Image (cartoon, grey):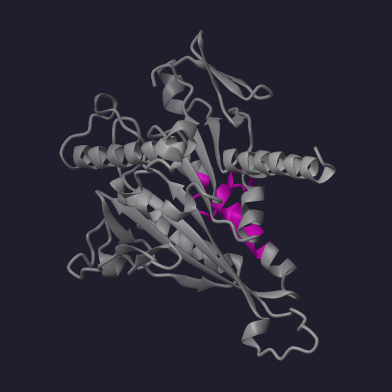
Amino acid sequence: MPHDDIAEEVKDVTDRKKDKEEEDGSVRVAVRVRPLIGKEKVEKCAECIQCFVKDKQVLIGKDRMYTFDCVLPPTCPQAEIYEQCVTQLVKGCFAGYNATILAYGQTGSGKTFTMGSGHTVNIQPSDIGIIPRVITHVFQEVAARANRCSVQVRVSFIEIHNEEIHDLLEPTLSGDPRTGAGAGVAKNIVIREDPKTGSIMVLGASEEKVSNYNEMAACLERGSVCRSTGSTLMNSSSSRSHAIFTIYIEQTRIDIEPVEGEAQDEQDLQEFMTAKFHFVDLAGSERIKRTGAVGQRLKEGIHINKGLLSLGNVISALTDDTRKKGQGGHTGHVPYRDSKLTRILQDSLGGNSRTLMIACVSPADIN
C-alpha cells in the first residue's frame, strides 16, 4: 500500500476516534451525595450509599453498584465541584459551544443548593453554588478578551410551572406564581425555532443586558424570589417548577488584519460568535406516597414527573448508540417536543453542545 494511502487511512481512524471521544464527552453525568440533614438524624436514618471516588462508582445498599463520569461524596466542597465539572464548560462557551447544566434528583436532595439558584447574599463563601461561581468566571473571561473583542452578555430567567412558562425577571407582567399579583395581565411566552440556524428562541421572555457580577447576581436574586415553591412532607420549601437561568454570550472580534491588496469594508473585518449557557434547576422527582401531595400539589407533582420523564427520554436517546444510528444509517428520533422543558433545551443538548447532569441524592435509607 502506498505511504500516502497508509497516512490517509491512519488519519481517518484518528479523526473517527476523535469524533467518537467528542461525541461521548458531550453528555456527562455526575452524582453528588449530600450529608444527612437534621430531620434524618432525628429519625435515626442510616446511610445506605458508599462513594468510591477514584473508581467513579457508588454502592447503594450491599449489592447495587453504579458508575458515573464523576462521583462527589458528602465531604466534597462546592469549589471542588466547580473545578471538576464546570470550569471547562465556561471556557467552551467562549469558544462557541452551547452548554447546559441540569440538577436532577428527589425533592430535598440538594439541587438548589448545588446550583446556587437560591439566595446569593449573606451566605458563606464555601456555600456559594455553581451559578454565582460561573458569573464570576464569565466576567473574568470577558476582561481577559477586552483587547481582542467586544463581548455582550445578557441573561434571562424563566420557570416552567404546570407546563406554563413564567418570566421570573418580569413577574408582574406574567403573574407572580406565588402571590398571583399581575395575573390578570397575560404575557404570551412561546417557543420558536429559527428556520435558518435551528436555534431555539423563547419569544416574550425578557432578556437583560449585564456588564458586571453585581448586575447578573441581582437578576438571579430577583428571579429566585419569584420562583414557585410549596411545602410537602419531604421538603418544607420544595421547588414546584423547573427553573432555567440562561446566560447569552456574544463576541465581536474587530482586530482582524485585512488581506493586502483586497478592499474590505468594516463589516467584512468582523467575526461574530454566540453561545448560551443554560442552568436548569429541576423540580424534585416525587413519589406521591412520600410527599403526601393532594390538590394543587398533586397536580404540580404530575407535571413535574411528566417533564422529568421527557427529559430522561431525550438523554437516553442522545446517549444510546443504537438509537443514534437508527435504521438505514439515519439518526434516531429524539423526542424534544414531548415537553416544553426539552423543547427549550433542544439546541443545547446533544450535537456539539456540552451537557452536564448532576444527580443529587440523599444517603438516607428512608429515601
Within the magenta stretch, is there residue 222?
A: no
The residue lying toward the viewer, choosing from 269 and 289, is 269
Question: Would residue 207 appear left or right of 295 to someone viewing this image?
Answer: right
Q: Tell me if residue 218 can be seen.
A: yes
Within the magenta stretch, is there residue 122?
A: yes
Residue occupying the point 84% across, 42% down: 3
Q: Can you say whether 150 is above or below 246 in the image? A: below
Residue occupying the point 46% across, 26% down: 362
Q: Can you say whether 296 is above or below 66 in the image? A: below
Residue 137 place in picture, x, y as percent:
66, 57
Q: Tell me if residue 236 can be seen.
A: no
Residue 329 place in picture, x, y as percent:
46, 40
Name the quarter where the C terminus is drawn: top left
Residue occupying the point 39% across, 66% down: 194
The residue segment tinted magenta is 115-140
The residue lying toward the viewer, choosing from 103 and 297, is 103
Question: Would residue 44 appear left or right of 124 to someone viewing this image?
Answer: left
Residue 247 place in picture, x, y as percent:
52, 61
Task: Kindly give the residue lying farthest to the front in the view shown.
Answer: 1
The residue lying toward the viewer, choosing from 57 and 293, is 57
Question: Would residue 131 appear left or right of 233 to someone viewing this image?
Answer: right
User: Residue 179, located in which quarter of the rendered image?
Assistant: bottom left
Q: How many marks?
A: 0
Residue 150 place in picture, x, y as percent:
65, 76
Residue occupying the point 35% across, 48% down: 336
Q: Can you say whether 7 is above or below 138 in the image? A: above
Name the quarter where the N terminus is drawn: top right
The residue lying toward the viewer, choosing from 11 and 194, is 11
Question: Would residue 190 appear left or right of 129 to someone viewing this image?
Answer: left
Task: Kindly give the residue lying farthest to the top in the view shown.
Answer: 62
